[in-house]
Image (spheres, rainbow, N blue to C red):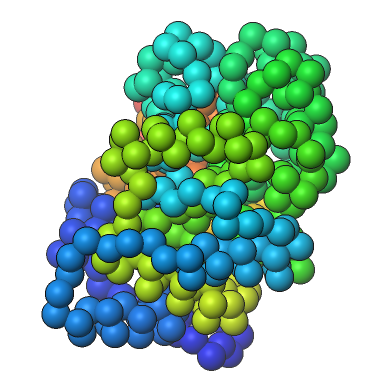
């Protein structure tokens, strides 16, 4: 690892901290849920300690300075100009999307997603008594592409589309042309477009994501953003909903209030402002570290485990592994690795049936943890092959 100004090497014991990743199950190497095992940016830690030093933790308001931090971040990094009047506060991207589904669609309406895609999209649609329609991505020439003919046909049957930009789990940065075409098709069929851009900052060095709204002028579109993935502050439950469509924004504002999803906890403002105003250099170093981790995985698989193929990606710290040559379902493989090695990865089928045969690997951890996880992956695959070969000889 290159020399850095921040500590991305220290292995932090997160056990017994009520961590979803480390305490929900007893796995030795949990590399599934999308949070990072690095120390938070010092500016964020200092801001939280400063707020914690005040001995009263009552209800909080959301100051304009929080929205100004968002506006400044997107303007200087992505040339995306927002205004305070076009923004709403929400406790998280998925709570806000759930509220949008309730106030902008009716029960039994169909909502389109592009699988393989973030598994919670499936849940939030079905839990709100709506129907899932899948525009399956095409894996061709070693990359994922959008089937625009299929998208055009299926958008004619739905009320809303939820876009993942950049795409989780395949790590794809959608181009301006692709996003423009999505906007044109949504306009053609009068479909509301909700774009989840929570992974936007986590691109490889030298790569930049394209905000949907700088690529398309489609007016019935809504953006959901948060610093939670970029700075590993999901526990503060903070996000913003943005739209230029004042009618949609007003309906969402009412629903967020009904759902009690429009208030912040006592530390959220401090965390968000410290992230966007004072932690940009930390993020740039993080991106270098994550890129190095990607190279570790790529080289390991090529030399030690060529039966598994890494899908090339330019964004997120979530890697998509093609395990189809093992000839087992992703759920069976996931459970075998957990039972045999204590390695917990996400089954590809969680992201839609088209993801079966793949695994998702979280690499946002110190290199030592990553290398330990890769060793467990190799040992698990060898054990699985030994069992399969034994059963064939019985």
Give the quarter of the image for residue 143. top right
Give residue 338's position: percent from left, percent from top: 30, 45
Q: Which quadrant, please, contains the N terminus?
A: bottom right
Q: Residue at x 50, y 11 (%)?
A: 109
Q: Is residue 127 above or below residue 387?
A: above
Q: Is residue 121 above or below residue 307?
A: above
Q: Quick check: 253 left or right of 303?
A: left
Q: Residue at x 85, y 40 (%)?
A: 177
Q: Which quadrant, please, contains the C terminus?
A: top left
Q: Relative to the observer, which residue lies in front, 335 or 121?
A: 121
**Can residue 113 be seen at all in this image of the molecule?**
yes
Q: Relative to the observer, which residue lies in front, 19 or 235?
A: 235
**Can residue 392 be seen at all in this image of the molecule?**
no
Q: Residue at x 58, y 32 (%)?
A: 247
Q: Relative to the observer, which residue lies in front, 221 or 195?
A: 221
Q: Is residue 253 above or below residue 268?
A: above
Give residue 215's position: percent from left, percent from top: 80, 45
Give the quarter of the image for residue 232. bottom left
Give residue 260's position: percent from left, percent from top: 29, 41
Q: Quick check: 217 left or right of 283?
A: right
- Report the number of numbered marks: 0
Q: Quick check: 314 left or right of 276?
A: right
């Amino acid at each position: 690892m290159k020399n850095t100004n921040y500590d991305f090497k220290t292995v932090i014991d997160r056990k017994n901290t009520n961590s979803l990743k480390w305490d929900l199950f007893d796995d030795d190497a949990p590399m599934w849920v999308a949070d990072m095992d690095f120390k938070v940016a010092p500016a964020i830690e200092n801001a939280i300690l400063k707020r914690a030093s005040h001995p009263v933790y009552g209800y909080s308001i959301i100051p304009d300075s929080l929205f100004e931090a968002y506006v400044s971040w997107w303007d200087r990094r992505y040339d995306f100009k927002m205004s305070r009047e076009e923004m709403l506060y929400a406790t998280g991207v998925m709570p806000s999307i759930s509220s949008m589904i309730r106030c902008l669609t009716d029960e039994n309406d169909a909502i389109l997603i592009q699988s393989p895609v973030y598994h919670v999209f499936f849940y939030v649609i079905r839990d709100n008594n709506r129907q899932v329609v899948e525009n399956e991505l095409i894996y061709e020439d070693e990359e994922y592409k959008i089937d625009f003919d299929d998208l055009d046909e299926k958008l004619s049957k739905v009320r809303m589309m939820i876009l993942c930009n950049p795409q989780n789990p395949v790590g794809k940065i959608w181009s301006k042309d692709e996003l423009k075409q999505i906007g044109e098709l949504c306009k053609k069929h009068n479909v509301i477009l909700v774009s989840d851009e929570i992974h936007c900052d986590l691109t490889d060095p030298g790569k930049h994501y394209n905000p949907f709204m700088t690529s398309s002028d489609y007016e019935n579109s809504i953006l959901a953003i948060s610093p939670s993935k970029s700075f590993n502050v999901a526990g503060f439950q903070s996000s913003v909903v943005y739209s230029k469509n004042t009618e949609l924004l007003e309906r969402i504002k009412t629903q967020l209030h009904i759902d009690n999803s429009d208030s912040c906890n006592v530390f959220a403002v401090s965390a968000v402002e410290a992230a966007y105003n004072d932690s940009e250099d930390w993020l740039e170093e993080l991106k270098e570290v994550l890129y190095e981790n990607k190279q570790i995985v790529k080289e390991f698989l090529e030399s030690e485990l060529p039966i598994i193929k890494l899908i090339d990606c330019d964004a997120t710290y979530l890697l998509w592994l093609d395990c189809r040559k093992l000839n087992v379902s992703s759920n069976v493989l996931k459970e075998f690795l957990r039972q045999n090695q204590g390695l917990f990865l996400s089954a590809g089928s969680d992201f839609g049936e088209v993801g079966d045969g793949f695994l998702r690997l979280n690499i946002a951890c110190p290199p030592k943890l990553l290398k330990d996880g890769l060793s467990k992956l190799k040992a698990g695959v060898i054990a699985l092959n030994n069992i399969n070969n034994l059963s064939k000889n019985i």
